[in-house]
Image: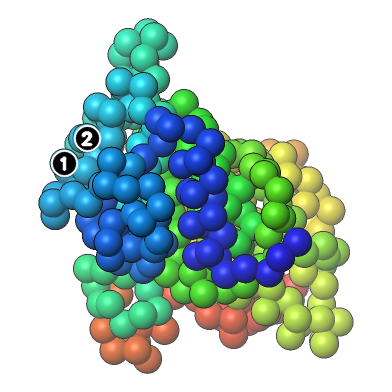
Amino acid sequence: MAEKLYIEALREGLREELIRDKNVFILGEDVGLYGGAFGVTKGLFEEFGEDRIIDTPISEAAIAGASVGAALCGMRPVAEIMFFDFFTIAMDQLVNQGAKIRYMFGGKAQVPMVIRGPMGCGTGAAAQHSQSFPAVFAHFPGLKVVMPSTAYDAKGLIKASIRDNNPVVFAEHKLLYWTKGEVPEEDYIVPIGKADIKRQGKDITVVAGSIMVQRALEAAKELEKEGIDIEVVDPRTLKPLDLPTIVNSVKKTGRVMIVEDDPIYYGWGAEIAAQIAGSEAFDYLDAPIKRLAGLDIPIPYNPNLERHAVPQVENIIQGVKEVLA
């Protein structure tokens, strides 16, 4: 395996799928010559040309609508939205059209499209460019929601998402773009709907997603010095959700904390908590299920306040100790 940046692994996955399937194309604001707002598509325009890497006007609804139409015609569009916040402008095309078409056509039509973009705070982008809300899309039947936390998963899941015959919402945290990880040179995919145990442990299960996986692993290193052994489970995809992997981990450790950077109210952590409480794992719990999530506030511009708005390593350490106590 070669060590690569998350952003490089993601770009590599896109490039391999563009080569593999002539029906794959990328569209979005500044994805061409500029290489994408965060540089994910850098170099692809030069290699594949303007017919495969398409710069669009500033209209998220048009980007999503064109993707739905292209997918219905047999293409496999990968749409980039410059900031995850602006998925909201594409809601009708994505939620009322793309997500519903397969059902409304009795399974005779498919919508093989990916809509992806950077989410999350930590870059000082303020309230309208820093949100995390992948759970919103997990609420709608017909959509799959993918949230990779490592370079390995980013490449494997973008390839799996492009090959899927359903619309996939692909959430990338901005702070993960410059993290490194081992990535195989050969072709591979990470199956959609399969969680991953990022760290084995025996004292408590920490279910974490996206950037919170990295923070949970950092917390685990610190707590290991105090003799506390954390198991870190990354769902990788919110929908479909790999509940059996989570349940088996909780049965093993007897304690669980769920960590997300979405705002606390009605987040995906609440759904996982409810699923655990209604499963066989409930009888194995030695402490109440704990949730750690973002505050119920817009993301502040001030860097100190911004940091306070979502869980950090020290919050995870404190939360684990509270559950163990």
Instruction: Rate crowding at label 1 as few (under 14), some (14 to 19) or many (20 or more) other CA atoms within 10 Å.
Output: some
Residue 26, position as x, y percentages in the image: 34, 45
Which coloring applies here?
A: rainbow
Residue 51, position as x, y percentages in the image: 28, 41
Which residue is located at x 71 percent, y 65 percent?
A: 2
Gap in Å between the C-alphas at discs 1 and 2?
A: 6 Å
What residue sits right under mark 1 in the picture? 62
Of 2 and 200, which appears nearest the observer? 2
Residue 123, position as x, y percentages in the image: 36, 80
Residue 272, position as x, y percentages in the image: 57, 48
Q: Is residue 282 left or right of residue 270?
A: right
Quarter of the image containing the N terminus?
A: bottom right
- Classify mark 1: helix, strand or loop: helix
Instruction: Rate crowding at label 2 as few (under 14), some (14 to 19) or many (20 or more) other CA atoms within 10 Å.
Output: some
Instruction: Check disc 1 and give the amino acid type.
Output: Ala
Mark number, residue 188 = none
Which residue is located at x 54 percent, y 55 percent?
A: 12
Of 112 and 226, which appears nearest the observer? 112
Is residue 285 depicted above or below 128 in this figure? Answer: above
Which residue is located at x 56 percent, y 39 percent?
A: 160
Q: Is residue 141 in view?
A: no
What residue sits right under mark 2 in the picture? 66
Q: Is residue 203 in view?
A: yes
Instruction: Check disc 2 and give the amino acid type.
Output: Ala
Quarter of the image containing the C terminus?
A: bottom right
- Classify mark 2: helix, strand or loop: helix
Which residue is located at x 72 percent, y 39 percent?
A: 244
Q: Is residue 139 left or right of residue 14?
A: left
Circle 1/circle 2 CB separation < 8 Å? yes
